[in-house]
Amino acid sequence: MFDTMTFTKIAASLCGALLVLLLGKWAADELYHVNGHGDQAYVIDTGVDESAEEVVEVAFADVFAAADAGAGARVFRQCSACHKLEEGEHAVGPSLYGVVGREVDGTDYGSYSGALEEVADVWTPEHLNGFLENPRGYAPGTSMGYNGLRDVEDRANLIAYLQSVVN
């Protein structure tokens, strides 16, 4: 009914079909790949200025003044994989209970990297903002393996939430 030769033919036909598919993809990429052969021959004027839009840099203090701690609770879910909010209860990272206004190595966590102590003494909202934006860029050599929060509103909301947990 289903012998070894039949199974071998089915497997070989599947491999052959895959090979033909990959060969076809390679040929299509070679035929239709555009490497940018110079400037556009004709530019249609639409009346819209496509020059670089001016990006307005908003001061962190202004964003932090309008921060929403409720939205920060949702952002904290990312942090909760490594940090706890209970006082003295550590996980992979130190407890974040009372972190705003606390000394950088102000808990009994024990394995703080020296990189953090070099950039700040106390976790002010401004220091937390810089650290949360890009931990490795703000404190080179830090052991925190998080890539950072790019959105300034998310950072402000998270810091407001961490500040409200203690109060």
Image (cartoon, rainbow, N blue to C red):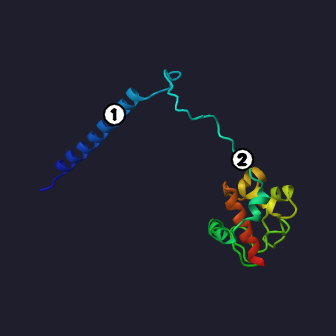
- Where does residue 164 sit, x and y in percent of width and height? 75, 75
- Where does residue 54 sit, x and y in percent of width and height? 69, 41
Measured Cα–Cα span from mark 1 to mark 2: 49 Å
Please state the total of marks drawn on the protein image: 2
Give above or below for 86 relative to 51. Answer: below
Residue at 73% of width from left, 77% of height from top? 89
Query: What amino acid type should be assigned to the residue bearing mark 1?
Result: Leu
Q: Which element carries disc 1, helix, strand or loop? A: helix
In the image shown, does 114 or 58 lie closer to the viewer?
58
Give above or below for 98 relative to 63. Answer: below
Which residue position holds label 1? 23
Quarter residue 29 falls in: top left
- Where does residue 76 sit, x and y in percent of width and height? 65, 68
The image quadrant where one finds the N terminus is: bottom left
Quarter residue 19 falls in: top left
Query: What amino acid type should be assigned to the residue bearing mark 2?
Result: Val
Give above or below for 157 relative to 17. Answer: below
Residue at 28% of width from left, 42% of height from top? 15
Q: Which element carries disc 2, helix, strand or loop? A: loop
Marks 1 and 2, the one that precedes in the sequence:
1
Label number found at residue 52: none
Give above or below for 144 relative to 4. Answer: below
At label 1, counting other C-alpha atoms closer than 10 Å, the crowd grade (few under 14, some 14-19, many 20 or more) is: few
Residue at 49% of width from left, 26% of height from top? 35
Q: Is residue 113 visible?
A: no
Q: Is residue 166 visible?
A: yes
The image quadrant where one finds the C terminus is: bottom right
Residue at 77% of width from left, 61% of height from top? 128
- In this rendering, the label closer to the viewer, 1 or 2: 2
Which residue position holds label 2? 56
